[in-house]
Image: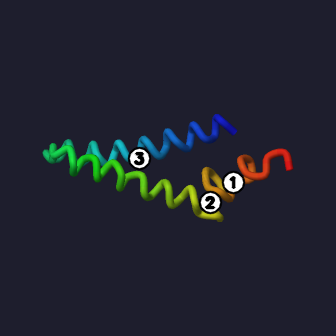
């Protein structure tokens, strides 16, 4: 289970960093805007995580829920 949580966390982090990097590469260097982009980049993956029908990393993933029950 730890490996799956690590994979999910890295996926979310990669997405958020990409969102901030795109703005930075386009010339926006205001730290507040870049921080907001980073946070906004987490919204999509977090919505995926709480979706009950998401099988890969979501709460519907049977390999991480009800383990041993």
Look at the numbered discs 2 and 3 and tell me whether their residues touch, using CB distance below 8 Å.
no
Mark 2 and mark 3: Cα distance apart in space: 17 Å
Residue at the disc numbered 2 = 54
Graded by Cα atoms within 10 Å as few (under 14), some (14 to 19) or many (20 or more), the crowding at tag 2 reads some
Residue drawn at the location 53% of the way across and 58% of the way down? 48
Please give the count of numbered marks on the rendered protein: 3
Mark 3 and mark 1: Cα distance apart in space: 20 Å
User: Where is 62 relative to 51, above or below?
Assistant: above
Q: Report the quarter where the N terminus lies.
A: top right
Residue drawn at the location 28% of the way across and 52% of the way down? 36
Lower position in the chain sequence, tag 2 or tag 3: 3
Give the quadrant of residue 27. top left
Secondary structure category for the residue under label 1: loop
Graded by Cα atoms within 10 Å as few (under 14), some (14 to 19) or many (20 or more), the crowding at tag 3 reads some
Look at the numbered discs 1 and 2 and tell me whether their residues touch, using CB distance below 8 Å.
yes
Residue 49 lies, in percent from the top left, at 56, 56
Residue drawn at the location 63% of the way across and 40% of the way down? 4
Give the quadrant of residue 44. bottom left
Question: Which numbered circle lies on residue 7?
Answer: none
Secondary structure category for the residue under label 3: helix
Lower position in the chain sequence, tag 3 or tag 1: 3
**Residue furthest front in the image:** 32
Mark 1 and mark 2: Cα distance apart in space: 7 Å
Residue at the disc numbered 3 = 15
Residue 2 lies, in percent from the top left, at 65, 36
Look at the numbered discs 3 and 1 and tell me whether their residues touch, using CB distance below 8 Å.
no
Is 63 situated left or right of 43 in this image? right
Graded by Cα atoms within 10 Å as few (under 14), some (14 to 19) or many (20 or more), the crowding at tag 1 reads some
Colour setting: rainbow
Question: Which numbered circle lies on residue 61?
Answer: 1
Lower position in the chain sequence, tag 1 or tag 2: 2
Residue 50 lies, in percent from the top left, at 58, 60
């Amino acid at each position: 289970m730890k490996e799956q949580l690590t994979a999910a966390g890295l996926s979310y982090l990669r997405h958020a960093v990409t969102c901030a990097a795109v703005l930075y590469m386009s010339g926006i260097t205001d730290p507040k805007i870049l921080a907001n982009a980073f946070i906004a980049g987490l919204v999509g993956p977090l919505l995926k995580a709480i979706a009950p029908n998401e099988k890969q990393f979501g709460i519907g993933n049977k390999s991480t829920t009800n383990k041993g029950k």
